[in-house]
Image: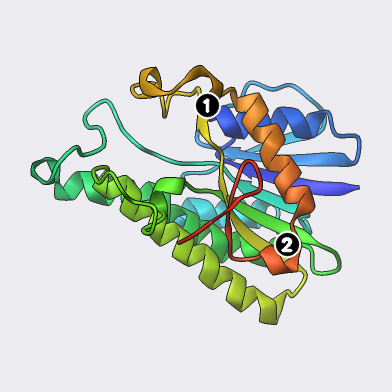
Amino acid sequence: MRKVAVIGSSGAIGSAFVDHYINDQSINNIFSFSRSSIGIDNNKVKHFFIDIENENSIQDAAKSVEEINFDEIIIASGLLHTNEFGPEKSIKDLKADNILKILNVNTVGPAIIGKHFLPLLNKNNKSVMAFLSARVGSISENKLGGWYAYRASKSALNQIIKTFSIELKRTNPKAIIIGLQPGTVDSELSAPFKRSVSKNKLFSAEYSASQLLGVIQRVDESSSGNLISWDGEIISP
C-alpha cells in the first residue's frame, strides 16, 4: 500500500489531490500538511500543521512523519497575489517587499520543504516529489512580460527542482523530482484573472488534480528535473 503526502492541502488543488487519494484503494495513508484545517473527516487522512514560510515549522512537520517512506509527496502551495497587491503590470509596480513575499512562498518555502522531506522518499521503489509550478516560469516562453515576481519565483523554483533531481540521482536514484503545470484552475489564486480565460481552458481543481496524477503515474527516472504540463507536455526552461 502506498503512502502519500500533500503539502498545501487546504488550497483548491491540494484539497483535490487529497480527495483523489481518499478514493484510491492502493493508498491507505494520506498525510496532509497546511496552516489551516482541511475539514476532511476520513480515517485515511492524518493532518499536520505547517507554515512554509518558517523553516522550524517545516522541520517539525517532517519530524512528525520521519518514520514514513513516502511514495508520493505533492507540494501544492503557491502565491500570485494578496489582498494588498497583485502581479505587476509594469516596472513601476515593482516593490521589494512584495517581491520578497512571492519569492518566500513560491521558491524559498518549497526549497526548504525539499531539504527536510526529500530524505523521506521511498528508496526501494519509484517515488515522486512533485511541486506545483507554472508555465510563466519558462524564460523562453515569456512573450508578454509583466508578472515580474511570480515569473521569477517560478523560474527559480524550476531551477531548484532540476538541481534536486541531479543530487537525488546519487542519493536516491529511484526518486523522481518534477514540476507540474496545473493549467488555469478555477481557484482563489486565479480569481481576479479568470474572466480573460476561455471556458474550455479554465479547469476545475478536481479535473486538474486528476490530470496531474496521471502525469505522476506515467513519469520515470528520465522525467526527473522536468516541468511537465497537465497534458504531459514538457515545458522548456
- Residue sitting nearer the eye, 16 or 46: 16
Marking on residue 85? none
Mark 1, Cα crowd under 10 Å, few <14 / some 14-19 / many 20+, is: few
- Element at label 1: helix
Rendered view: 101 above or below 66: above
Q: Quadrant of residue 227?
A: bottom right
- Looking at the image, is mark 1 or mark 2 nearer the viewer? 1
Is residue 98 shown left or right of residue 60?
Answer: left
Instruction: Work out whether residue 215 or residue 82 is closer to the camera in this orientation and state it.
Output: 215
Mark 2: amino acid: Leu
Residue at x-position 14% and y-position 41%: 90
In space, the residues marked 1 and 2 are separated at their CA atoms by 33 Å
For image coordinates 12% across by 46% down, the residue present is 91
Task: Pinpoint residue 37: horizontal percent, then vertical percent.
Answer: 57, 27
Q: Which residue is mark 1?
A: 201
Q: Residues within 10 Å of mark 2 (few under 14, many from 20)?
A: many
Which element type, helix, strand or loop, lies under badge 2?
loop
The type of residue carrying mark 1 is Lys
Give the position of the C terminus as an image quadrant.
bottom left
Residue at the (74%, 57%) spot, across then down = 219
- Residue sticking out furthest to the left: 92
Outermost residue to the bottom: 170
Q: Earlier in the sequence, mark 1 or mark 2?
A: 2
Foreground of the two, 45 or 208: 208
Residue 111 left/right relative to 64 = left
The spot of residue 157 in percent (x, y) is 44, 58
- Above or below 199: residue 23: below
Task: Name which residue lies at 61% across and 58% down.
Answer: 178
Q: How is the image coloured?
A: rainbow
Q: Give the x, y percent position of residue 111.
A: 48, 61
Q: Which residue is mark 2?
A: 121
The reply to whether residue 54 is visible in this rendering is no
